[in-house]
Image (cartoon, grey):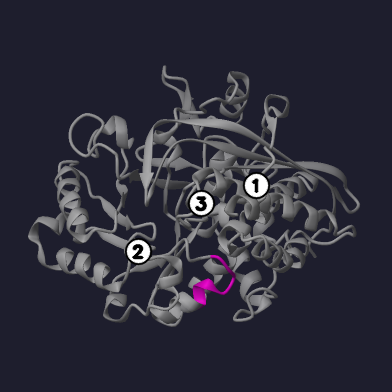
Amino acid sequence: MAPRLKLRDIAFFERPVHFARPFRFGAITINATPQLFVRVEIEVEGRGVAVGASAELLVPKWFDKRPELSPAQTVDGLRRSLQIARGLYLARTGFQTAFDLHASCIGALIATCAKKNIPALAAAYGPAEIDKAILDALLRGVEANFFDGMAGNIAGIDARLSPDLKDADLTTFLAVRKPLPRVAIRHTVGLDDTVEGKGGVADPHENAGASHFKLKLSGDPAADAARLVRVGKELDTLGRHYKVTLDANEQYADLAGLQALMDRLDRDSALRPIASHLLYVEQPMPRDITRRSPLGSLAARGFIIDEADDSYDAFPAARALGYRGISSKSCKGLYKSIVNATRAAKWSAGGETFFVTGEDLTCQAGLAVQQDLALGAFLGVTHAERNGHHYVDGFGETPAAEAAAFAAAHPDLYADAGQGIRLSIHNGDLLTGSLHAAGFATSVHPDWSALRPLEQPGSLQEQLA
């Protein structure tokens, strides 16, 4: 039986993160954004008090892409979702399982955020971050590591939020997980990134030996095809087998534009280096258009949803439209990732192939990347997008002593090769051995005294008035 816990406190902090280079995806270019840190204190029934932590970037214009909002206003939406979630979670005063707490709050959270003009994807950010910190505290409180704890369903996950599944589907899926000892990085090529030459796609100092690449799309079939031709030429010089994924971040307006790009991939021999190595295409159209647009003949290719994954029923709805996969991201909720991975395994047993992918928007060195990496390794995600290893310079503004503490506790994940402590990538892979420490994939916590309190958001209604 899953241990029960009582929440005692939730605190939010942030730290500025400046990027080493601009990161352009969709309609936004990011040069800097704050990183959120969550600290929770719980009482584990019969065990005493434990502290847990989580972290994630507060990324503008991804969770909420409405054009009338500034990037700063969309970050404020994430801060509001955190505050609303905090109030709901702390209002639950009795002992309950970690998943009880999540499940009892998520509906009210989404509804409250909707009244405050915060879309569901942004609304889910608050509980996603709190849930990770609670799980870290719970695992520490019972002295278990993430992989063993989740295999035994320490959180008490059940099917109340996914009625298409049975409780036994989830417990069986969890029990048979064999965490991967290494996960390949999928190197992102942003829309402003260099393609050829030094610092380009084939530069080993840039791609860190990756054999998987994620290529951003702009939504213009002709421009995207021309750029993919250039990228394909560079990838063919690597001298090793490679795979690619494409990510449009909702930029294709409709199925017609998407069909035009797919036709080019089918017919243009110059695009063969991309087409013949393509694994899947991620979130091509805006989330609202996605929900009402069956893929039809395009479903023969592997399409996945990402931004359209804003509820527990998003994957079944996408499956009915022809989509085969869905992304796992810590910032969208670890319990939803587990539910969706259970679905993919169950559906695939019927003969078709469904899958969960690892996509990284918000994970920087330290807590964020470790917890997301552990989740992917547990689910069996063999390769995952990793942005922090090249868009941010190592640990960025993290105090040197804090970065050194993470490196000492997780020497298989970090190293200093003369440019400061950075992710240590082994032949294109990240190793997961040190993530088996007690807690949610981390032996250390941030230096709380070096963080500033979360900035207070303004009223979105006032900002839109």
User: Residue pushed farthest top?
Assistant: 418
Image check: 25 left or right of 98?
A: left
Q: Mark 3 packing: few (<14 Cα in 10 Å), some, or many (20+)? A: some
How far across and how far down the image is residue 15, in percent? Answer: 61, 31
Is 391 situated above or below 70? above
How far across and how far down the image is residue 200, in percent? Answer: 24, 35
Snapshot quadrant of residue 177: bottom right
Q: Choose between 184 and 191: the one closer to the eye.
A: 191
Residue 69: assigned label:
3
The magenta stretch spans which residues? 310-316
Q: Dot 1 lies on which element?
A: helix
Of badges 1 and 3, nearer the viewer stands 3
Residue 145: assigned label:
none
Measured in 3D between alpha carbons, the distance from the residue under mark 3 to the one under mark 2, in whole angstroms, is 22 Å
Asked if residue 362 can be seen in this view, the reply is: no
N-terminal label among 1 and 3: 3
Disc 1 target residue = 79
N-terminal label among 3 and 2: 3
Q: Mark 1 packing: few (<14 Cα in 10 Å), some, or many (20+)? A: many
Q: Amino acid at mark 3?
A: Leu
Q: Mark 2 packing: few (<14 Cα in 10 Å), some, or many (20+)? A: many
